[in-house]
Image (tube, coloured by chain):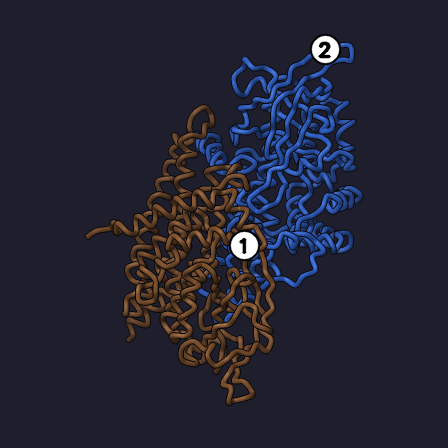
Amino acid sequence: MDLQFTPQEQAFREDVRAFLKDQLPSRIANQVKAGQRLSKADQEEWHAILNTRGWLANHWPEAHGGPGWSTVQRFIFDTECALAGGPRIVPFGVNMLGPVLIKYGNAKQKAHWLPRILSGEDWWCQGYSEPGAGSDLASVKTTAVRVTDASGDHYIVNGQKTWTTQGQHANMIFCLVRTDREAKAQSGISFLLMDMNSPGVDLRPIRTLDGDCEVNEVFFTNVKVPAENLVGEENKGWTYAKYLLTYERTGIAGVGFCIAALAKLKVIAARVLKNGKPLDQDPLFAARMARVDIDLENMKTTNLRVIAAAASGGVPGAESSMLKIRGTEIRQEILSLIRRAMGPYALPFEEEAQYAGYAEPPLGEPEATTAAAHYFNYRKLSIFGGSNEIQKNIISKMILGL
Amino acid sequence: MNFQHTEDRRMLADSLNRFLSEKNGIGLRHQSAGSALGFSREVYAGLAELGTIGALFPEDAGGFGGTGFDVSVVFECLGRNLAVEPLLGALVVGQALIAAGTDAQRAALESIMAGTSVAALAHEEPGSHYELSHVTLSATAASDPSAGGWVLNGRKAVVPMGDAADLLLVSARTTGQPLDADGISLFLVRGDAPGVSRRGNGRIDGGRTAELTFTNVAVDASALLGAPGQGLTVLERISGYALLALAAESLGAMDMAKDQTLEYLRTRKQFGVPIGSFQALQHRMADLLLEVEQARSAVINAAAAVEDTDRTARERALSAAKYSVGRIGTLVAEESIQMHGGIGMTWELPLAHYAKRLVMIDHQFGDEDHHLARFIALGQAAACA
């Protein structure tokens, strides 16, 4: 075994670092490091910088605009970005829909949609979850009925989606819709691309417990969708949906973000005093930090093992469920420790301090204004993308054969 | 043995819960918790009228309770109803007046019990991180010795309802270094005293706190509470009441979160069946039940111990309770959200606010690590003695 990166991989890492030093706007990096919310314009700016360098869709094949990286290169890139304060790219077009179109879309769909994902012309959101469905994604109730009239071939869509992250910014949504109501749950589902500006699409924000509104409900009332927006075959959408999910879950593991968050925690714990000594010398707090540090080191290697196994070009299967569970647990624990490190200063909350440009001096530690809100907001990590309980069911079934 | 509350306390709990569910329903509660004041004066007056504040103090001080079980009954109700009214400040400042106040100083108890004046403990400082002896705000003798007054300079942090408080109990260092046990003195200061500037903030779990800056705040000799330099003993005693109160409040909130989650497991269907039929969730819910009962016992132990004259026994029981609700409260919050799934993340669902309160209780008067370490230290000190 050789756990070192190869000289080529190390050289690649230097390239990535140089690029980030040169191209990642410090204004955006500072916002990310401060844990502040990014505007749509900030996210679009970073998207465009990556696209100009050809590093945006880093897991797409070169033929479609990908850089032709190995899985190890992608891991290095993601980690370096997170450490430098690079924002998470909006994943719905690039990381989720892109691979589905590349594998299952027809030539015309690829030619039309893929360049628009790269250029940022379309901002996609995800239409999987429905009210009452939760992680039971196959219980799709939103219907699409195919009609042919003078204006052409269409689907008429009715129903509701929920938990649509950043749907308020999106002009397009990819949806699971039920095209056969007689079929068993997982058959009869289709994968449809819809214009958010179509008549009959309504969006309603959902306020989360930290007071923010980043998720939405989306309502469809007799929405007319051109039949050419069907991806793959009618009633075969579940296959595409699952393919997309393995991409989503691997991304959710967020090893790079865990590494960056742990580095931040260590800086905080070396600065915050308890009983006249830095918190990282407090035996109980030090033990908590050490445990999560060890867990993360192990997780990094587990992640690389999964990556190495998938290096032949495929995507990880049920292994992505392992990464999702452990990665989200570790990230939640680190965020919990950052909250704990704030002491009583976890209590005050200033809505305005969540955004860039807030001029008031921070209360207590500089991180205090966001630490508790992040902790609460990131309880979602173990719920979304298929709850961790669902991931355990997948592991039980697919890996353990139970 | 008898683990039933007395008839009087059961009646108090019933009337409190009835009053709060009517006057402090979740929508009203959010309104007052998010308002500029941070609580509802109407609800606070109503609570006083019901005798809620009086129940926190003994008869010889004008109240009609004041035992550990009186305190725990009241705060458990507040926790069940997510009340944000400033009873904790009333409890600790009132107990300080009883423990160390002169007759003139104790007169303030009347308006505290009537709910007409808001009292707050201004003790925490930036960087003190729950350590009671970490006091740097200075009190120096006034330049005119015949007047016998004091001048306060320094900062106090995260003072509950500090921007609305009429009466502040301020800890200050009259001699020594930060973390010295001796040299801490307590002062009663009007919230609007000249030289006190207040920056108020909303709290993530509702209500408000404030950062206070004291710039040459001159107070009379009569503002000193208790003996100069001997304030730490009083601080420990009144913090003990806060630990009990917060533990009981947490218990009330975790009971509610547990009940709401159980109801959800029974009614929410997924894959065609109630999710409570999944063994993975059944076992986790069983664990929650078990942990909440452990927390209940911890609160009972603390309530029984709060007046114990044996300091080690008393303080260990109080730290044990706060440690227990810190750990269990966070567990209940996280597990309740997780078992609710996405809906548990929403503002619309009361559960999310119970979860926030449960986690934030751990950030008041010492978190689980702080009290675990304190529990160990108290035991070691007793063993050496």
What's the CA distance linking mark 1 and mark 2?
Answer: 59 Å
Chain B palette colour: brown
Answer above or below: position of B167 versus A377. Answer: below
Residue A320 is labelled as none
Image position, residue B24 (x, y; %) = 47, 46
Q: Which chain's residue wears label 2?
A: A
Query: Dot 2: what SS?
Result: strand
Image position, residue A46 (x, y; %) = 74, 46
Residue A148 is labelled as 2
Query: Dot 1: what SS?
Result: loop
Please give the residue where the numbered disc 1 appears in the rendered image: B38
Answer above or below: position of A345 versus B7. Answer: below
Q: Amino acid at mark 1?
A: Gly
Residue density around tag 1, few if under 14, some if 14–19, many if 20 or more, within 10 Å: many
**Nearer the camera: disc 1 or disc 2:** 1
B195 displayed left or right of A329: right
Image position, residue A266 (x, y; %) = 56, 61
Q: Amino acid at mark 2?
A: Thr
Image position, residue A389 (x, y; %) = 47, 36
Q: Which residue appears farthest toward the right when viewing the image?
A: A52
A22 displayed left or right of B242: right
Number of marks drawn: 2
